[in-house]
């Protein structure tokens, strides 16, 4: 529990400078404005990023993420998306295969895992359609959720720093 509180606060504190950086450098070139909702989501992403690494051990983060996976899986089954459901189930197993502070505690997973935010945002916002039309890479695909991605990466790294386990 103490670990949970530490990582929760790590995620909250670490994202504050990023919010100012995004306001300074992203507005209005990358995003039109930084709304209260944007900031709230950035905090959410950072907190989730900070809790993610301990998904490989009995923790508050593990309980939270597996509940999320469970709900998504039920939803996919109801929608008869069996392949997506199977892939989710397979991926959800992987944190438990390694030892604690294994691959979930690496700098490259800190960059890789949060990229799912950009991928899902692109799919659900329809930005993925941009890829199918010329110019094939418009940059918009990545940029409109880039500050959420960076927030999750920031929270993730705060966890690694607090664990003193950057590899
Ligand atoms: Zn950890």
Image (cartoon, rainbow, N blue to C red):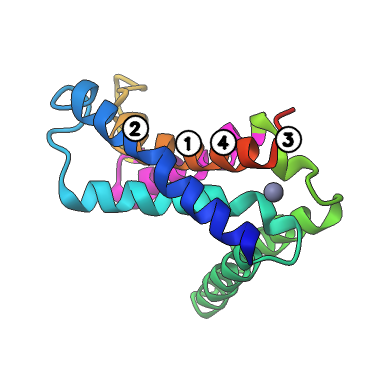
Q: Residues within 10 Å of mark 3 (few under 14, many from 20)?
A: some
Cβ–Cβ under 8 Å for marks 2 and 1 = yes
Residue 102 point in image, percent of width and height: 80, 43
In the rendered image of this protein, does residue 40 appear above or below residue 18?
Answer: below
Q: Residues within 10 Å of mark 4 (few under 14, many from 20)?
A: many
How far is the residue under mark 4 from the one under mark 1? 5 Å
Residue marked by disc 2: 18
How far is the residue under mark 3 from the one under mark 2? 22 Å
- Mark 3 CB in 8 Å range of ligand 1? yes
Q: Quadrant of residue 162?
A: top right
Residue 148 point in image, percent of width and height: 37, 41
Residue displayed at 69% across by 42% down: 163
How far is the residue under mark 3 from the one under mark 1? 15 Å
Point out the stretch of residues depicted in magenta: 109-128
Q: Is residue 6 left or right of residue 24?
A: right
- As helix, strand or loop, the secondary structure at mark 1 comes to helix
Image quadrant containing the N terminus: bottom right
Residue marked by disc 1: 154
Residue marked by disc 3: 165
Residue displayed at 80% across by 58% down: 96
Residue 53 point in image, percent of width and height: 66, 49
What secondary structure prevails in the magenta region?
helix
For this rendering, which residue is in front, 10 or 70? 10
Residue marked by disc 4: 157
Going from N to C along the chain, the mark reached first, 2 or 4, is 2
- As helix, strand or loop, the secondary structure at mark 2 comes to helix
Q: Is residue 118 left or right of residue 140?
A: right
Going from N to C along the chain, the mark reached first, 2 or 1, is 2
For this rendering, which residue is in front, 4 or 54? 4
Going from N to C along the chain, the mark reached first, 3 or 2, is 2
Cβ–Cβ under 8 Å for marks 3 and 1 = no
């Amino acid at each position: 529990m103490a670990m949970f509180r530490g990582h929760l606060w790590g995620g909250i504190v670490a994202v504050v400078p990023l919010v100012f950086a995004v306001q300074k450098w992203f507005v209005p070139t990358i995003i039109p404005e930084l709304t209260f909702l944007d900031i709230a989501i950035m905090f959410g992403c950072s907190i989730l990023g900070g809790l993610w690494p301990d998904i490989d051990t009995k923790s508050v983060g593990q309980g939270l993420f597996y509940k999320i996976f469970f709900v998504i899986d039920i939803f996919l089954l109801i929608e008869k998306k069996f392949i997506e459901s199977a892939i989710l189930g397979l991926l959800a197993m992987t944190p438990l295969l390694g030892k604690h502070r294994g691959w979930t505690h690496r700098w490259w997973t800190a960059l890789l895992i949060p990229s799912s935010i950009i991928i899902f945002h692109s799919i659900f916002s329809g930005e993925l359609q941009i890829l199918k039309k010329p110019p094939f890479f418009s940059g918009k695909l990545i940029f409109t959720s880039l500050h959420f991605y960076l927030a999750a990466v920031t929270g993730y790294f705060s966890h690694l720093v607090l664990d003193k386990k950057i590899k």
